[in-house]
Image: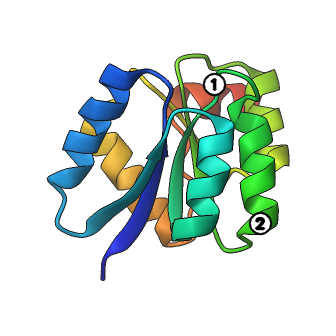
Amino acid sequence: MVTTVMLVEDHRVMRQALTYVLSKEPDLLLVATAADADEALAAGVRTNPQVVIMDIRLPGRDGVDATRELCRELTDVRVVILSVTCTRELIDSAFAAGACGYLVKNGSHRQLIDAIHLAADGGCPVTDSARRLLAK
């Protein structure tokens, strides 16, 4: 079964690199990309992805706000935050907004792919550094 994915990332080179990585996975279909929260909301409503990979730092409204709105509009969507920053405050706000997972950008592309599959299957992918903060 193919999992539909939307990627929200404001840095073009990162968005292009992740688009390439996702395109190599036969069981993932990238249905939309967005560079900010407004684009993400419009694309999400238009394409109804199963999983959204959401950068937490976006121009204008941040990824937490975008996650909150996407989860309100698309009740079955699974949002996984992808961020350079990993603090307890950001993790808590992401989960409170409706995210199901939190990944740090220093992970491998394989970890990202595995996280997408886990999220699509109803799991909560969390990188080790975020997990340690949550355990405190």
Q: Contact, CB < 8 Å: mark 2 with mark 1?
A: no
Who is closer to the viewer here, 108 or 52? 52
> Where residue 2 sits in the image (x, y, percent)?
31, 76
Q: Quadrant of the C terminus?
A: top right
In the displayed structure, does residue 11 sit left or right of residue 124?
A: left
Q: Which residue, given by chain and number where applicable, does mark 1 sit on?
A: 58
> Where residue 112 sits in the image (x, y, percent)?
37, 43
> Where residue 63 sits in the image (x, y, percent)?
68, 35
> Where residue 35 sits in the image (x, y, percent)?
52, 33
Give the vertical position of 64 relative to 62 (above or below).
Answer: below
Question: For the residues marked 2 and 1, what is the alpha-carbon distance in whole angstroms?
Answer: 19 Å
Who is closer to the viewer here, 108 or 46? 46
Give the vertical position of 75 relative to 85 (above or below).
Answer: below
Q: Residue at x 74, y 72 (%)?
A: 75
Q: Amino acid at mark 1?
A: Leu
Disc 1, SS:
loop
Q: Which residue, given by chain and number where applicable, does mark 2 sit on?
A: 73
Disc 2, SS:
helix
The answer, for residue 101, to whether it is visible in the render is no
In the displayed structure, does residue 13 sit left or right of residue 62?
A: left
Name which of mark 2 and mark 1 comes first in the sequence: 1
The answer, for residue 114, to whether it is visible in the render is yes
For disc 2, the neighbor class at 10 Å (few under 14, some 14 to 19, many from 20) is some
Q: Which mark is residue 79?
A: none
Who is closer to the viewer here, 131 or 100? 100
Total marks in image: 2
For disc 1, the neighbor class at 10 Å (few under 14, some 14 to 19, many from 20) is some
Q: Amino acid at mark 2?
A: Glu
Q: Residue at x 43, y 59 (%)?
A: 5
Q: Residue at x 43, y 21 (%)?
A: 11
Q: Quadrant of the N terminus?
A: bottom left
